[in-house]
């Protein structure tokens, strides 16, 4: 992305807002809003991992843990409070706080890539296991029973702030979620343009060099990790409002796997790629759900293997290249770099 | 007295089963640096191979000790040629591709064997120690596991192939200069690692109800055992399995099996925080 000057930043924001508004308003004409809401929520979840992995170089195998934490926070706080504005805020703050603790634990221990992946994986597994055993009446938080394998149904849905009776579902929920995604997308863009974001990218490229320049990479990685978790938590809350039930499967390995697949398919190191990847893969999955010939997971797995082998940079950089080619040759070509690197265009 | 014997057997069994399910991964990940997230599904494949063979009338010991390793070893060979050989040296990519592979295998199991629990009866009857009943099969797992570790040391230290394999993993260019084909060595080692996973799957098959998604239960334990073990293959495997098996059983006895599992995971996280490079980065250095 062309960062730096104020003018290009303003142009970038303008393009995102206009394209985003067109998509938000136009998509309901061609697709069912119920499904679109899900795609938007998954897009936000993918964006959260795309931020910390694609730009921060933190491969989190347990992003689903923060998604699930957000959803559970929304449900539990909603039952106890009786409306959903404060729970929505909490569902961002709680996962962010948990991620800050977990991140501090990992980054201040200077753990490498693989260990980080395994610890985040184990973390979401612990939550998954534990929540599955909370079926008994002993497991209550306030008035909310955790409900074990069956999860928590019947919590207050998203409502207009201050008016608990005006619940949002169906089309209004889609517009709220879509605008939320747009706002988060703009915030992420702004974050990446700020010095914090550029140093985060520097850390991804060469941790040692950035640390020798005097930046505290441990604190910065922890903060970035927490921000990603907060976004995932918001996606989780919206998911809870959409699904109207939260279950431990939100924490499952498959959920975490899917988030990673979205990012790989869409394109790492881009802002738009993960969102696109989530939409494409989920659409494929839903379409496949209608037929019984091939198992869903078989196809998802095949997609992941093929992308890793043949298109490790994902769809978005290729689209950007196509776009640059289509509107004329006077632009400099997208830089070809090693996989997982590359500051490609968002 | 009787109780302490029973507890001792249970602890040894927990340690042995951890070592058994991690052995294949220790070779594939510990030696070859391929993060095989499909390890659990390799084991499940071994389990299905065993159950299918028993269903066809094969003796159960032949099925689990010979057929399962061969089937999974061949499968590993095919997968290595198709996918992993393109990804050596790119750890994160091996992790992603193998995750894709694991999803594919789960999908395949569902299509072939159905989304139901299958199982096979344990072939060894239980016996009693005083007032307590002990599952005889647990002793069998302990014996297999010990023999396996001894065999791994013997192959790695005692045979020419073990020497060449270890050398190739350290400096494949030097091994190539000395006339060995790294490609061939990698292929063989991966197939052997897969065969070990198949063996583990076959041996565990009578103990767990096999469902297509059963691999997930093994993968986390196997990974933390291998990672916590560290760079020294067999000693790391034994010491990490010893630590985690003990923690798991102690908490299982004191509280409940689920808490035992959670305690194992927590112990792993804390251990990795304290010794990020694994137990054998500090102890047993320079052995096998």
Image (spheres, helix red, strand yellow):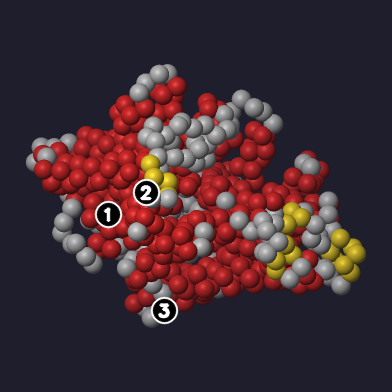
Q: Have a look at marks 1 and 3 and say if they share a chain.
A: no
Which corner quadrant of the image does residue A152 belong to? bottom right
Query: Label 2 is found on which chain of the structure?
Result: B
Q: Kindly give the residue lying farthest to the left in the view shown.
A: B178
- Of badges 1 and 3, the one in the foreground is 1
3D distance between C-alphas at marks 1 and 3: 41 Å
Residue positioned 90% across, 64% down in the render: A165
Residue positioned 69% across, 51% down in the render: A150
Q: Kindly give the residue lying farthest to the top in the view shown.
A: B56
Question: What residue would you read off at disc 3?
Answer: A215
Using the image, tell me which numbered label, if any, was put on residue A37: none
Q: Position of residue B37 (x, y in %)?
A: 42, 46
Query: Label 1 is found on which chain of the structure?
Result: B
Q: Is residue A316 visible?
A: no
Question: What residue would you read off at disc 2?
Answer: B129
Residue positioned 55% across, 31% down in the render: B110
Query: Label 3 is found on which chain of the structure?
Result: A
Q: Earlier in the sequence, mark 2 or mark 1?
A: 2
3D distance between C-alphas at marks 2 and 3: 63 Å
Tags 1 and 3 touching, CB below 8 Å? no
Residue positioned 59% across, 62% down in the render: A66
Q: Position of residue B113 (x, y in %)?
A: 53, 27
Residue B6 placement, left or right of A280: left
Residue B139 placement, left or right of B186: right
Circle 3 sits in a helix, a strand or a loop, which is it? loop
- Of badges 2 and 3, the one in the foreground is 2
Quadrant position of the C terminus of chain A in the picture:
bottom right
Q: Position of residue A55 (x, y in %)?
A: 49, 62
3D distance between C-alphas at marks 2 and 1: 27 Å
Question: What residue would you read off at disc 1?
Answer: B238
Q: Is residue B57 visible?
A: yes
């Amino acid at each position: 992305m062309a960062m730096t000057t104020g003018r290009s930043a303003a142009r970038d924001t303008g393009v995102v807002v206009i394209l985003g508004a067109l998509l938000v308003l136009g998509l309901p004409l061609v697709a069912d809003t119920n499904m679109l809401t899900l795609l938007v929520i998954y897009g936000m979840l993918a964006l959260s991992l795309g931020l910390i992995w694609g730009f921060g170089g933190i491969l989190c195998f347990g992003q689903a843990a923060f998604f699930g934490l957000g959803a559970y926070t929304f449900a539990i706080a909603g039952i106890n409070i009786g409306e959903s504005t404060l729970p929505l805020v909490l569902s961002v703050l709680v996962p962010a706080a948990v991620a800050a603790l977990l991140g501090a634990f990992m980054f201040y221990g200077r753990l490498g890539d693989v260990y980080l992946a395994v610890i985040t994986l184990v973390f979401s597994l612990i939550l998954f296991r534990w929540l599955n055993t909370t079926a008994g009446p002993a497991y209550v938080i306030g008035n909310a029973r955790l409900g074990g394998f069956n999860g928590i149904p019947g919590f207050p849905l998203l409502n207009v702030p201050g008016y608990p009776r005006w619940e949002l579902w169906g089309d209004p929920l889609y517009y709220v979620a879509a605008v939320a995604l747009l706002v988060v997308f703009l915030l992420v863009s702004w974050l990446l343009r700020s010095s914090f974001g550029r140093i985060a990218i520097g850390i991804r490229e060469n941790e040692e060099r950035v640390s020798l320049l005097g930046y505290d990479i441990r604190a910065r990685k922890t903060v970035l990790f927490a921000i990603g978790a907060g976004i995932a938590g918001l996606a989780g809350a919206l998911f809870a409002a959409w699904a109207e039930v939260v279950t431990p499967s939100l924490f499952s390995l498959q959920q975490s796997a899917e988030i990673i697949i979205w990012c790989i398919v869409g394109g790492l190191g881009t802002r738009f790629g993960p969102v696109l990847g989530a939409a494409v893969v989920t659409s494929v999955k839903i379409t496949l759900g209608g037929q019984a010939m091939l198992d869903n997971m078989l196809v998802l797995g095949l997609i992941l293997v093929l992308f890793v082998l043949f298109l490790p940079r994902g769809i978005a950089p290729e689209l950007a290249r196509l776009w640059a080619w289509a509107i004329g040759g006077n632009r400099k070509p997208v830089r070809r770099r090693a996989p997982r690197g590359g500051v490609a265009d968002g | 007295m009787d109780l302490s014997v029973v507890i001792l057997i249970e602890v040894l069994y927990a340690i042995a089963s951890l070592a058994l399910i991690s052995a294949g991964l220790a070779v594939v990940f510990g030696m070859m640096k391929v993060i095989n997230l499909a390890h659990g599904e390799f084991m499940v494949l071994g389990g299905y191979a065993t159950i299918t063979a028993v269903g066809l009338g094969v003796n159960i010991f032949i099925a689990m000790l010979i057929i399962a390793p061969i089937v999974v070893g061949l499968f590993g060979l095919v997968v290595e040629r198709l996918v992993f050989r393109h990804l050596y040296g790119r750890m994160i990519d091996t992790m992603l591709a193998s995750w894709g592979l694991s999803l594919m295998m789960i999908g395949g199991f569902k299509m072939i064997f159905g989304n139901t629990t299958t199982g096979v009866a344990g072939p060894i009857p239980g016996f009693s120690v005083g007032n307590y009943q002990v599952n005889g099969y647990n002793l069998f797992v302990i014996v297999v596991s010990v023999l396996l570790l001894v065999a791994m040391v013997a192959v790695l230290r005692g045979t020419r192939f073990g020497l060449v394999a270890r050398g190739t993993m350290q400096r494949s260019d030097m091994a190539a200069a000395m006339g060995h084909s790294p490609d061939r060595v990698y292929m063989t080692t991966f197939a052997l690692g897969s065969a070990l996973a198949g063996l583990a799957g076959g041996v565990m098959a009578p103990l767990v109800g096999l469902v297509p998604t059963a691999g997930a239960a093994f993968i986390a334990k196997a990974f933390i055992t291998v990672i916590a073990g560290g760079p020294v293959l067999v000693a790391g495997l034994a010491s990490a399995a010893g630590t985690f098996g003990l923690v798991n059983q102690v908490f299982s006895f004191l509280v409940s099996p689920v808490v035992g599992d959670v305690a194992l995971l927590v112990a792993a996280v804390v251990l990795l925080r304290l010794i990020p490079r694994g137990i054998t980065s500090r102890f047993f250095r320079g052995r096998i």
